[in-house]
Structure formats: C-alpha cells, structure tokens
Image (cartoon, rainbow, N blue to C red):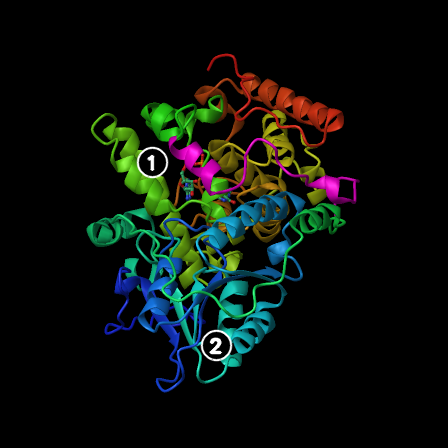
Amino acid sequence: MAPGVTPPTTAPKLETGPVHPGRVRVLKPGSPSSPAGPVVYWMFRDQRSRDNWALLYAAHLAARSAAPVAVAFNLFHPRFLGAHARQLAFMLRSLRLLRRRLHSLGLPFFLLRGDPAHTLPALLRRLAASTLVADFSPLRPVRAAVADICDRVGPEVAVHQVDAHNVVPVWAASDKLEYSAKTIRPKIHRLLPEYLVEFPELPLPAVPWTADDPPEIDWGELIAEVLRIPELGGDLGVREAGEVPEIEWCEPGEDPAMEVLMGNKDGFLTRRLKNYETDRNDPLKPKGSSGLSPYLHFGQISAQRCALEAQAHRKSCPKSVDAFLEELLVRRELADNFCYYQPQYDSLQGAWEWARKTLMDHSADEREHLYTKEQLEQARTADPLWNASQLEMVHYGKMHGFMRMYWAKKILEWTSSPEEALSIAIYLNDKYEIDGRDPNGYVGCMWSICGIHDQGWKERPVFGKIRYMNYAGCKRKFNVDVYIAYVKRLVTETKKRKSESPSSLIPKHSKIIKSE
Ligand code: FAD
C-alpha cells in the first residue's frame, strides 16, 4: 500500500440499512453510552438530494437512533484548490436550489465557511451531534480535513464515511494502486451486480428538527461575492473576476443535470446515445459525448443513476452503452483509484519508474518550440489547433475530450521539463475547466504527460517512450480547420453575448458546426 494511505477499515458488522456495508467506513467510533444526538451529513463531493448513498445512510442512522438529521456544507477558505468564479458560482447556484429542496424534505442545511477542521467540530459541538457522516474524496486537502476533524471532535462523536461518488466504492474496487484500465476493469465488473442497484426513496426524517434553524443565507450576496473576488495571479492581463467568468451554456442543479442525461429535447440517453461509440472522440461533434462532466464533478448527478439509466438502452445500442459505461465507471473509477493510492497523484514522482526514467533520459532534448506559461495561457503558440483548444477551454469552460489529450501532450513538447509541463497543464486545467480540480483531471494530465495507465511506445525525442500525438495525426482524424473556425465563432459569440448582456444565456451546445 502506498505511504500515507489510510488502510480501509470497513466494519463488517455495521448495520447500514439500505446502504451496502462495503460503501461505509467507520473512521472513528463514537461512545456507545452517549445520548442519541443529531446525525450531521457533511456533504462535500456529492452535492445532491437524490440518489445519494451518504444522505440515505445519514437518514438511516438518524431513524435508527430516533435522532434528527441535518446537512452541512463547508465553503473552504481559502478557496478549495484555487476555485475561480466560474466553478464557485456554478456550485453555489446549485446549492441554493439544493437547500430549498432539502428544506422541503424537512432537512436543515447549514452553510459553513472556513477551515472544515474548525467549522465542522464547532457545529457538531453546538448541535450536540452524535455522528458525522462524511462524503469521500481521494484528494489530499479533503483527506487531511477529514483526518483533522476526527482528531478534533469529542470522544462521543462517531465519524463515518460513505463513498457516494463511485458506483463501486474505491476501497471495495481494489486495495491497491492499479496499473491500468485492464487491471481494474474485471474487478469493477465483478462487483457491479452488488453495487449497481436501484436507490431507495429518501425517507422523511423520523424525528423533526427542533433545534435552532440554520442561519439564513443571502445567496445573492454570496454569489455576487465570489463573482467579485479578484482572481489570483491572473496571467491574461485582466486581474479581476472577469478573467474566469461563469459559463452560461450549462445550467447548474440536479434537475438540469437529469435533463442533460435524459431530457426529451436534447438529453444524452434520449437523443444522442446511439452515436456515442463513434462520435465521442470527434472534436467536430461537441454533442457526441454526454456533456455530464460538470454535473458529475460537483456531484449534482449520481454516476450510478447515469449507469442505471444507460443500461436500460442496452438493447437498442449496446456498443454505445458499453463505451459510455467504460468511461463513466472504469476510467472514472480508475482515476479515483490512482489519486487514492498514489498520494503524489499530481507530480512526476507519482509516475511509474519506466516513465520517469524515459522522461528524464529525454529532458535535455532540444525542443522545436519553448513557450512560457503566459504564452500558453494566452494561446500564443505557432500551432493554431492547439491555440483553438486552449481558447475553447478559456472561453467556453470545457475543452473537447479528444483535444485534451493533444493539448496536454503538446505542453510536454513545448516546455523545458516534464515537471514544468505537468504543473502548467494542471494549473490551466484547474483554472479554466468547469469540471477541473477533479481526479479525472489529475489523471488526464498524468496520462498525457507521464504515461500513467498507458504503456511504453516507440522512443522519440522529448517524449521518450510516452505516447506521442501530433498535428498530422489530428488532420487525418478530423478537419482541423473546421474545429479552429468553430472555436473562433464560439469565442466571438461568447464575448459578444457577455458584452451585450452579461447574464444572457447562450444556447446549449451552440449549433455553430453546420455539419451536425
Ligand atoms: P463522456 O465521454 O460523456 O464521459 C462520461 C463521463 O465519464 C465523463 O463525464 C467523466 O466523468 C467520465 N470520463 C470520460 N472520459 C474519462 C477519462 N478519460 N478519464 C476519467 N473519466 C472519464 N475529466 C474531468 O471530469 N475533469 C477534468 O478536469 C478532466 N481533465 C482532463 C485533462 C486531460 C489532459 C485529459 C486527457 C482528460 C481529462 N478529463 C477530465 C477526462 C475527459 O476528457 C472528460 O471527462 C470528458 O471530456 C468530459 O466530457 P463528457 O462528460 O462529455 O464525457
């Protein structure tokens, strides 16, 4: 097991009600003699009321001990992994709706701000809570916060954790760092019959909330505040909130997420699934993939719900369903496996020995171009295709999945070391992608630059044995000029709409590409 990884402590005898016991871990037992205080669910990565195993588990614990249940969300200070207005506003707009829905279900919602290692224990003390149920995330800051909370809460408080994000919980899928999709795939598929099951309804609280209501939240002011925050270290020459503005094509919230999954008008499963197998890797077909990553990243939709609904279409388009489940389950859970078992998930040190060696062997190779972080951020390279993908990310907030690979690999080719390339790729990905700051992002950059989950390829300058991609290959695959023209129009349209009316919506999946 990798250093710094907490060994799984699944409690086999835990009575977990409707939730699979393998999904729940006891991080800290409480005192059996303590009175049955409220159960608090610390929602972090799974920001939804529906299809949420962690919330279901908290509700079950509360009902079993005849205690009330509450939901708490903590806004990290300073901003979590450097989130910008784009990501924060998307999250807060959805939380505003979520609070309303929880309220209608009789569940109070506490919004905390600061360091969760302080705010959560303080809330638990104030409420005389008996149990904290925490979401799971493999990322270092969250794991550190969970560990600190366990140290700081009183001996009477139990801390349990539920992996509500993955279909097969990360610790159940595998107890070690997996080498590739090939090694984790059979493990996940073997466990799907146990874990990929329908969700029960969230029961109404057995005991009503009678303690103090949570303080009122001025959502308008909160959102205005994140939109006002001066951006940190902006490199586009615009050092203000407008640098990474909100996106307007993707409506935040649980209902819009379900609409994207299976809405009648343009839903992925209803309208677009049948061509997924062939179209998802074609940058000229932005509607070829599901478009679910913003919702999955913020947990506004459950991957399990997406998988359950996709399975229902297996008869009509088996290949596309399998391809979608491969991305949604195998690749996504492989990313969590990597970040969970490899604490250096965002560093060259986290790469396999063969990849580190080959990259180091070629680190002094002459580069045809060398660009600074600023030149890359401003899309000022000699490659119009790369510049277009960078601008798609900066202005639209979501780069096409195929282009992400090309984009990251070129950064390796054009910077002075693999360490620099990785750090720039992660910096840009986290800053501009609406789905950034995610295990998928760290693994995407590590795959492209450091060969993780990949094999060695023919040795060549700079890349060594890391898989290579080039402009000529893209040209053979799709019409690069059409993609470049598409992004140009997308950027112009986005800028125009912003200047005309900052709050106007541009149509979802802009129909600029005529060939679609
Ligand atoms: P779909 O093809 O519809 O896939 C459905 C879901 O499966 C996605 O939403 C995602 O959750 C998952 N998925 C798809 N491809 C992958 C993959 N290769 N690895 C892991 N999970 C996958 N994904 C992010 O969610 N956040 C990121 O910050 C991110 N950064 C990336 C950076 C690089 C350099 C690379 C190469 C890939 C990155 N990806 C990232 C993975 C992938 O490109 C996106 O998940 C995908 O493009 C999102 O669009 P979609 O939801 O329409 O995808």
The stretch in magenta equals: 234-262
Point out the quarter of the image occupied by ligand 1: top left
In the image, taking residue 178 as reference, residue 96 lies left or right, namely: right
Where in the figure is residue 331, as x and y percent of width and height? 37, 45
Give the residue at x 64% y 22%.
488
- Asked if ligand 1 lies within 8 A of label 1, the reply is yes
Q: Which residue in the structure is indicated by mark 1?
A: 324
Q: Is residue 281 magenta?
A: no
Q: What's the mark number on residue 209?
A: none
Q: Earlier in the sequence, mark 2 or mark 1?
A: 2
Identity, as a three-letter code, of the amino acid under mark 2: Cys
Where in the figure is residue 353, as x and y percent of width and height? 43, 58
Give the residue at x 63% y 58%.
216
CB under 8 Å between discs 2 and 1: no
Marks 2 and 1 sit apart, C-alpha to C-alpha, by 37 Å
Q: Which residue in the structure is indicated by mark 2?
A: 150
Placement of 513 over or under 392, stated as above or below: above
